[in-house]
Image: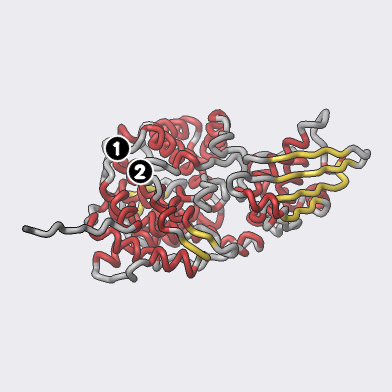
Amino acid sequence: MTAAVTQTPPDYLEQLARFVGSTRAEDIPARVLERARLIMVDTLGVIAAGMRTPELLAFSDAQLASGSPGHAWVIGRGRRSNPQDAALLNGVAGAWHDFDEGNTLANGHPGIQVLPTALAIGQERGLPGREVLAAFALAYEVVARIGMATQVKLIVNPHGTFGVVGAALVAARLSGYPVARMRALASLAASTCMATNRHTMLDGATVRNWYAGHSSLMGQMAVRLASAGLTGPSDGVNTTFSLVLGDGFDRDVAVAGLGDQWMLPDGYLKLYPTARYVHSAIDAWHDAASKLPHPPSPDDIERIDIQAYRLAAFLAKQHPSDWFGTRFSVPFAIATLAAGGRSGLAAFDNEAVADPSIRGLCARIHVIEEPAYTAVYPGLQRVSLQMRLRDGREVRGECHITSGEPSRPVNPIDLDRKFEQLTAPIWGDGRARQLRDALHAIDRCPNVAHLVPFDP
């Protein structure tokens, strides 16, 4: 009589690797793919705008001059390059204005960590849009789940961390890397994450935007290293996110409901180019202003006091030094919106930083942490705002769920307007609409290298 052989079930990291490597496109729910297409549209617009800034023009010129040719878009430059350089540049540009999508439960921005790599490799290899879309959705899910399972250290910026694992897995799937070796690849990739620094936000240090580019570059590099025979530790994901970048990592959370409960549709899309936590305060501001006969000007306001959850209260700097610092200042966001006259990126540019009425109001806006609000985060994103006007009136505003969250989605018309405002100045109205429509139909494209008849 032959004894039964007991098989050890795959561990969490094996499950995540197989999920990306083996899940068929047709097994991904339609609602997940629909949201993935929407994220693609939004993200490419944000990348294009970031790529047209002086710093990215200079950086991309230098990078492309020293790199090899290829078929992958450098979005916003009308040029193509090899997948490593293209994904790197698109990753940095996508993070530049802090206008890209994110996921509250995932503690970060999964999309910009993996989309540049998915698109670049898909274009380099001439892959069908359906396969690129599916690989993007699957890798996004892994990044989001690792982020959710991690107790991230407060000092750590999430860009360039979880995303390296997702970028490695999406690169592996689209490159034909063996599924049986993807667990080891994920472990190796997790051992190449950056020791990022959230103080870059407070100091207006734009090196923070490089972190997202690091995910794109190191994800592909991890595949190259593993293919050459280099090895990682037995479980680099747990080690990195429980001991180095986090204060704990829950393996069970990372795989709970995998394939049935999707995180990708539960992300957010932004209508303001600021850190996500600032949006909660913006919502509280709009709630307070709506209770007055007409919006108050900076000169009308004597003082604003804001109570917020910890991550929002962390962004309390009253006088950012430049446009990048404005993305991480609750006082500035409220002051520039109260001043009016500018919208979109212009409301957070250097002219707005120098505006004396905005600077004056910033000094009268005070942000503190409310521990009770921190205790209910991220399920609720509570912020309270009390505004006292010079005529003696007082008004209060609240945010419980930040606009853009799944239970409070943004208007699709506003997202179309955002895309047009970011891209029409670069490509013109016609080409901008053509690219948007092509991305919405990407799963019907036989070769993403020829998604549209021009290089955006």
Task: Please tell me which residue lies in front, 456 or 392.
Answer: 392
Name the residue beneath numbered marker 1: 27
Please tell me how crowded label 2 is: few (under 14), some (14-19), or many (20+) other residues with Cα within 10 Å.
Answer: some
Do the residues bearing badges 1 and 2 touch, measured as CB atoms within 8 Å? yes
Element type where label 1 sits in the image: helix
Q: Amino acid at mark 1?
A: Asp
Number of labels in the image equals 2
Q: Is residue 403 left or right of residue 365?
A: left
Q: Is residue 226 left or right of residue 300?
A: left
- Residue 82, can we see it? no
Q: What residue lies at 83% left-to-right and 28% top-to-bottom?
A: 293
Q: What residue lies at 47% left-to-right and 34% top-to-bottom?
A: 432
Q: What residue lies at 37% left-to-right and 32% top-to-bottom?
A: 30
Q: Quadrant of the C terminus?
A: top left
Q: What residue lies at 57% left-to-right and 38% top-to-bottom?
A: 404
Element type where label 2 sits in the image: loop
Q: Amino acid at mark 2?
A: Gly
- Residue 145, can we see it? yes
Picture coordinates of residue 348, whole percent (x, y):
67, 48
